Amino acid sequence: QVQLVESGGGLVQAGGSLRLSCATSGVHFAINIMNWYRQPPGKERELVATINAGGGTNYVDFVKGRFTISRDIPKNTVYLQMDGLLPEDTAVYYCNLRSVRTGDMYWGQGTQVTVSS
C-alpha cells in the first residue's frame, strides 16, 4: 500500500524559509515521478515542482529560484526547500507520486503553510 506523509509546514514571516518533507512507503519512489502541489485558499490545486526518476527537476515559474525539490533515496523521502517565502505562497502543500508504469496518482494528506506579511 502506497503511503505519503508530509510534514514541515507551519507559520512563517515573509522572506522566511521552510522545508517540507514527504516520507514514502509501499513503493520504490525513486523510479517514479514525485511532485509537490499546493492549493491556495479558494483556488484550484496547482503543480509546484517535479523530480523525475533520473533526478531531473522542474519548477513552475512562480517558484523558480526560490524553491528546491530534492530526494533522499535511502530515506525514501522527498523534500521541498522553500526560501524567500511570500504571502501568496500560503496554501496546503501536497506530496504526489505518479506511477511511471500505470499512471496512477497517490496523494499525501497535505501540510499547511502560512506566510504572514
Image (cartoon, rainbow, N blue to C red):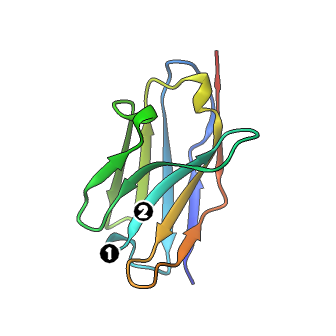
Residue projecting furthest to the right: 42
Question: Measuring 41% from the left and 57% from the top, which residue is drawn there?
Answer: 78
Residue 63's disc is: none
Task: Answer yes or no: is residue 26 visible.
Answer: yes
Instruction: Residue 93 in the image: state x and y as whole percent.
Output: 60, 47
Image quadrant in which you'd find residue 54: bottom left
Instruction: Residue 47 in the image: state x and y as whole percent.
Output: 51, 50
Which quadrant of the figure contains the N terminus? Answer: bottom right
Disc 2 packing (10 Å; few <14; some 14–19; many ≥20): many
Residue corresponding to mark 1: 31
Residue type marked 1 = Ile
What secondary structure is found at the residue carrying circle 2?
Answer: strand
Which quadrant of the figure contains the C terminus? Answer: top right
Residue corresponding to mark 2: 34
Residue type marked 2 = Met
Left or right: 115 with respect to 77? right
